[in-house]
Image (spheres, rainbow, N blue to C red):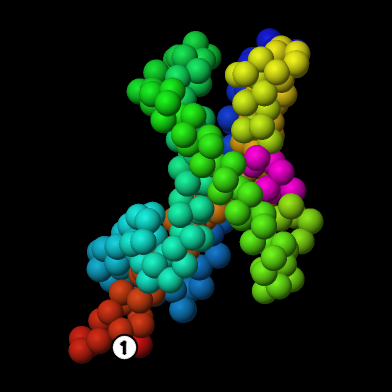
Amino acid sequence: MYDFLTGPMLYLSLAIFIGGCIWRVVWYIRGLDQKLDRVAYKAHLEHGLKHAARSVIAFIIPFGSHTWRAKPAMTIATFFFHFAIVGIPLFAPAHTTLMDQWLWIAPLSLPQSVVDFLILMFFISAAFLILRRVALPEVRILTNWQDVMVLAITIAPFITGVLASTHTGDYQFWLNMHIFCGEVMLIAIPFTKLSHFVLFFMSRGQLGMDFGIKRGGLKGTKFAW
């Protein structure tokens, strides 16, 4: 099982993840309206890209936007949750060793103490986000079974990873489950709400272009909108 998960299944899940993300980006761009979006973006591309970059940067920096500053607890939980999801798979010492072995890529490793801190903050943040969905009526009414599944898919690699790394019970079983859950998450990203992994950048970029071009950004110029 281990050889299958670290061989054909690993390469298949990576291919689906990369190909699926490219497909989501292409489909997003193809979905732009010719009259409302493409004409303005094409005519003022350089100006629009500048505002798109500004919009994305404001939202990937903690408290970098009014939205983040309005809800500090939510902001802290969200950023720790996402830092852990991106940082640990790529920079945990155990993962970088295996990436060098399986994918011939050797990124820098985070100190194990930093990884342990991020894992702890991930579980605290996950508990906060789950309780928020349960406790707040305005969030609970928007939560469906797909949201629950996405949370389960996201948290499962961390639970199985901790069980494997602490040698709780059958080490080989939890190691296989950890790899399997990680590959399930990779495959799920393009086809579920986890697709915001790439669509966040597309939607934030488009909003930045909209405000930079059509919603006041070119006020005082000869822009026809």
Image position of 39 (left or right of 183): left
**Residue assigned mark 1:** 224
Where 197 sits versus 211, above or below?
above
- On the image, which quarter does residue 129 sit in? bottom right
Using residue 155 as the reference point, say whether residue 84 is left or right of it: left
- Residue appearing at x 62%, y 44% in the figure: 189
Marks counted in the figure total 1
Quarter of the image containing the C terminus?
bottom left
In this image, 13 relative to 26: left or right?
A: right
Name the amino acid type tagged 1: Ala
Q: Which residues are magenta?
A: 149-155
Image x and y of residue 178, in percent: 67, 25
- What residue do we see at 25% from left, 68% from top? 47
Q: Is residue 13 visible?
A: no
Residue at the image point whose x is 68% and y is 10% from the top: 3
List x then y, in percent, for residue 76.
46, 54
